[in-house]
Image (cartoon, grey):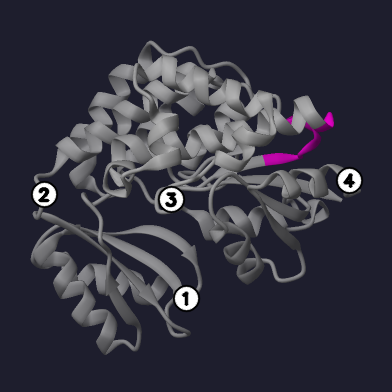
């Protein structure tokens, strides 16, 4: 039974995240202390007590979500003897790719925290508030063909692209507000529901190029080593282990599409057919979004969330 560990993206944050892990495990507390020191702020206190509007800020939410994921990974090994190398693959949704890289040892915890802090700040700086927008296209008729058609209609008036191909029935578009508004109209004409998202910037679209440039400079000096477990990249939807390829893809990821559906499909494809042969998915960290996506994409696979001490114990005891 091949296991893939999944790491959540922005939107899974909530006040109180990680508190149960910190209360139960010294190893988890060490992670939060290391992240606080790396950032020069008490992010762990913000995670535990809020306020929610401060935690939701991109520059705080991104390192916070990574910290909870790493607290769970550290506790799994320290308390239950389960190392990340027991998984065949790791993958993370958007910022979660940094969590996956940290979990697999490609990036240090401190560097990952600092990179995500900068990533959040750079993304916010890239587009003035109100000029960009994102929308979720949902419903049984929603597929990539429909989303591409809606984005193409939006592109007639401005930048508009498919940002997150999450799964059939859940695809996110991103771009200039007027363009996204036009795309929403087209998506509804084609039979999809379209919900504008309450986000601070239009992520994963060409408008994020200034942020990509900032991340390129930061990543150029970051130490990246070969991961101990294969990391499935958002941009390629395939496993990557070469440190220089990983560095380049992290830059491309800022403006590029999150190919989550394709990543999960490849992971769930039997190894005899050229896929990952994964039969079990486990989301590590805050929230429970990714198991649901995994089940919709690979209904025959097992999919669970690991974000409480009880979850970690159950995972450690499972075959």
Say what secondary structure mark 1 lies in: loop
Q: Circle 3 sits in a helix, a strand or a loop, which is it? A: loop
Give the residue pinned by disc 4. Answer: 317
Q: Is residue 134 left or right of residue 11?
A: left
Q: Is residue 216 above or below residue 5?
A: above
Q: What's the CA distance linking mark 3 and mark 4?
A: 28 Å
Give the image quarter of residue 20.
Answer: top right
Q: Which residue is mark 3?
A: 14
Say above or below: 247 vs 68: above
- Mark 1 or 3, which is nearer the eye? 3
The residue located at (67%, 24%) in the rendering is 26
The residue indicated by pointer 1 is 169
* Closest to the observer, 28 or 219: 28
Does the CB distance between marks 2 and 1 fall below 8 Å? no
Note whether 8 is above or below 185 in the view shown. Answer: above
Which percent across, then down, holds residue 54?
A: 28, 42
Horizontal side, residue 147 vs residue 75: left or right: left
Highlighted magenta segment, given as a residue range? 80-89
Q: Residue at x 35, y 43 (%)?
A: 50
**Residue 70 appears at what percent x and percent y?**
59, 31
Q: CA distance from mark 2 to mark 4?
A: 47 Å
| Residue linked to disc 2 | 129
Q: Mark 2, mark 1: which one is toward the viewer? A: 2
Residue 81 colored in magenta in the image: yes
Residue 90 versus residue 191 in the image, above or below: above
Q: Is residue 72 visible?
A: no
The residues tagged by marks 1 and 3 sit, at their Cα atoms, a distance apart of 25 Å
Which callout, 2 or 1, points at the residue further toward the start of the chain?
A: 2
Measure how far apart labels 2 and 3 are at the Cα level.
23 Å
């Amino acid at each position: 039974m091949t296991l893939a560990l999944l790491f959540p993206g922005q939107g899974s944050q909530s006040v109180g995240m990680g508190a149960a892990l910190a209360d139960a495990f010294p190893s988890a507390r060490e992670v939060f202390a290391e992240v606080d020191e790396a950032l020069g702020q008490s992010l762990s206190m913000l995670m535990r007590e809020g306020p929610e509007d401060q935690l939701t800020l991109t520059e705080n939410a991104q390192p916070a979500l990574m910290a909870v994921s790493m607290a769970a990974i550290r506790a799994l090994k320290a308390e239950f003897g389960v190392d990340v190398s027991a998984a065949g693959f790791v993958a993370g949704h958007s910022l979660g790719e940094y969590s996956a890289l940290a979990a697999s040892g490609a990036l240090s915890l401190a560097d990952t925290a600092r990179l995500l802090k900068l990533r959040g700040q750079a993304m916010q700086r890239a587009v003035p508030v109100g000029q960009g927008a994102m929308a979720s296209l949902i419903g049984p008729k929603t597929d990539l063909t429909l989303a591409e058609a809606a984005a193409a209609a939006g592109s007639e008036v401005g930048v508009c692209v498919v940002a997150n191909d999450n799964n059939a029935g859940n695809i996110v578009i991103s771009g200039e507000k007027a363009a996204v508004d036009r795309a929403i109209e087209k998506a509804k004409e084609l039979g999809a529901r379209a919900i504008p998202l309450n986000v601070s910037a239009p992520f994963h679209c060409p408008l994020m190029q200034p942020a990509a440039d900032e991340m390129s400079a930061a990543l150029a000096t970051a130490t990246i080593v070969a991961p101990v477990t294969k990391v499935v990249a958002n941009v390629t939807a395939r496993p990557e282990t070469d440190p220089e390829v990983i560095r380049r893809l992290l830059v491309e990821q800022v403006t590029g599409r999150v190919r989550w559906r394709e990543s999960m499909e490849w992971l769930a494809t039997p190894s005899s057919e050229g896929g990952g042969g994964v039969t079990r998915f486990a989301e590590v960290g805050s929230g429970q979004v990714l198991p649901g996506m995994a089940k919709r994409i690979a209904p025959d696979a097992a999919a669970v969330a690991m974000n409480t001490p009880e979850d970690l114990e159950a995972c450690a005891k499972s075959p």
